[in-house]
Amino acid sequence: MSAEQQSYYDDNARARWLVLISVCLALFVVSLTMSSANIAIPSIAQDLNADAVSVSWIPSALLWGSIIIMLPIGRLADKKGRKKLYLIGCIGFSFVSLSVILVQNIEALLALRVFQGLSTAFIFGTGLAIISSVFANSNRGTAIGITSSTIYFGLSCGPVVGGWITQHIHWKGVFLMPIPLMLVALLLIISNVKGDWKNEESGPIDWVGSVLFALSVSAFFIGVSELPDPLHILYTIIGILLFVVFIKHQNRTDSPLIRIKALNENKALVGSMYTSILMYSANFPIVFLLSLYLQYIHNLSPSEAGSLLLIETVIMMILSPFSGRLSDIYGAKIITTVGGLTFSLGFMVLVWVDMDTSMSLIIISLILLGIGFGLFSTPNNSSALGSVSGDKLSIVSSIMNLSRTMGNMLSTAFVLMLMSIVLGDVAIQSENYPLLLLVVQITFGVSLALALLASYISYYKR
């Protein structure tokens, strides 16, 4: 964006807010779809005759589709225009979501989720960068906080709205309901947002690195999901080796996706990236596993389970703008550390869940988790985006979204592995509830360890 265009947004509060509304609406829709699909999993499993491992791929497929193109999208947005790629993501997401009306089996649904993930990479890879550019000289931390709050609002509404639609209409409505809102986001930015944000001097896209990264992530994700099967051990090793090749390629090429040396020298960005991976790894299984736990073991309806899971995300939504404002004043270190430790307390409660755990304990844990993550997320993102110049915001936005998605992917792969080892290719029936509980307990124990490690890095390594 030219200096004249930037000045226009600096002097025009209405224009800034229109940009913020459009991006927030798109992020709300994506988040709503993600969390509402999780609450619909038991109904999907019954309707499509899918086993435990197959339905575990419903959140995983979207993550995989998003992560494999996240880095090139960031570089492409810097080169071709953030607004342009943002619009492509919105249109693609709407079209793919509409195609759910054709789904007749679990394989088709998983393919749809992959394409949804590809579309979300365009939206997440550009959204925060656009907000950071528009609010570069005016309350960026607060704007990012509102953006984060919108994501949590979508996650909050998802279980309740998705549970109601699944129970009273049909699970396919979960995929169809956000389309009108996404179209409104499109119209807002097309009709009101002028200009674009891109770096005219940006180098060529590293397509070789992009392919290496996509292959390494795919092999590793597929491999870890069904360990300790010998073939999947081989996939995991191949994924790790390909990632080593990717890193070596990034150090050799003239226009890398990630400048490893420059990244390592940016202490704030590295700290934000590592803690993001750890915190999102810890957080992502909560809705998926507690949804199964509450609906199967405690016999709650989809809407009842969704209403209970609303607690964590509502608290995140409320706290995010305030934590962003605090990060503008005091910096990120203390706030993210306190957030990580509070988040850990929530898991200290959840690791003790059993067949008879009271709802009051579940509620206490969700309150602690919501407070902790609400304090952590916005200051962490603001610290990363504030550590680079304006022409690098898209790639840093992609890096932070990549770290979030990588965290989600790693935890999902871990849950898939546990599902495969503990439950296998069987439907979740009452006789298997103790095995499902074992998966829940192990996962939350690992999440506790990850949250504590993130707290340590936030305080000592940032």
Image (tube, rainbow, N blue to C red):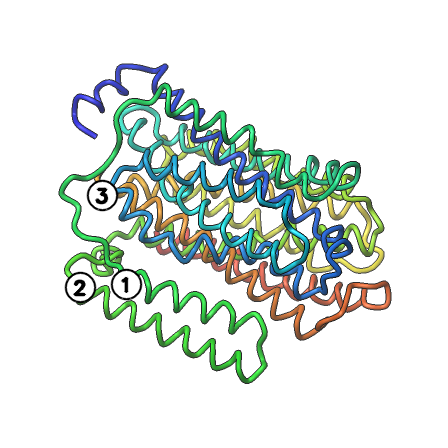
10 Å crowding of disc 3: few (<14), some (14-19), many (20+) = many
**Residue shown at 58% from the left, 44% from the top:** 99
Query: Where is residue 17 shown, x and y percent of the image?
Result: 39, 20
Q: Nearer the viewer, residue 248 or 375?
A: 248
**Residue shown at 64% from the left, 60% from the top:** 56
Check disc 1 and report its element: helix, strand or loop: helix
Residue type at tag 2: Thr
Q: Nearer the viewer, residue 433 or 357?
A: 433
Check disc 3 and report its element: helix, strand or loop: helix
Alpha carbon distance from label 2 to label 3: 18 Å
Circle on res. 79:
3
Where does label 1 land, which residue? Answer: 209
Taking the image as shown, residue 432 lies to the left or right of residue 278, namely right
Do the residues under discs 2 and 1 have CB atoms within 8 angstroms?
A: yes
Circle on res. 430:
none
Q: Earlier in the sequence, mark 2 or mark 1?
A: 1
Residue type at tag 3: Lys
Q: Quadrant of the N terminus?
A: top left
Alpha carbon distance from label 1 to label 3: 17 Å
Where does label 2 land, which residue? Answer: 253
Q: Earlier in the sequence, mark 1 or mark 3?
A: 3
Q: Nearer the viewer, residue 263 or 108?
A: 108
Query: Where is residue 38 shown, x and y percent of the image?
Result: 65, 49
Query: Where is residue 402 shown, x and y percent of the image?
Result: 40, 53
Figure quadrant of residue 85 = top left
Alpha carbon distance from label 2 to label 1: 9 Å
**Residue shown at 73% from the left, 67% from the top:** 438
Total numbered circles:
3
10 Å crowding of disc 2: few (<14), some (14-19), many (20+) = few
Q: Nearer the viewer, residue 418 or 104?
A: 104
Residue type at tag 1: Gly
Q: Is residue 462 above or below residue 31?
A: below
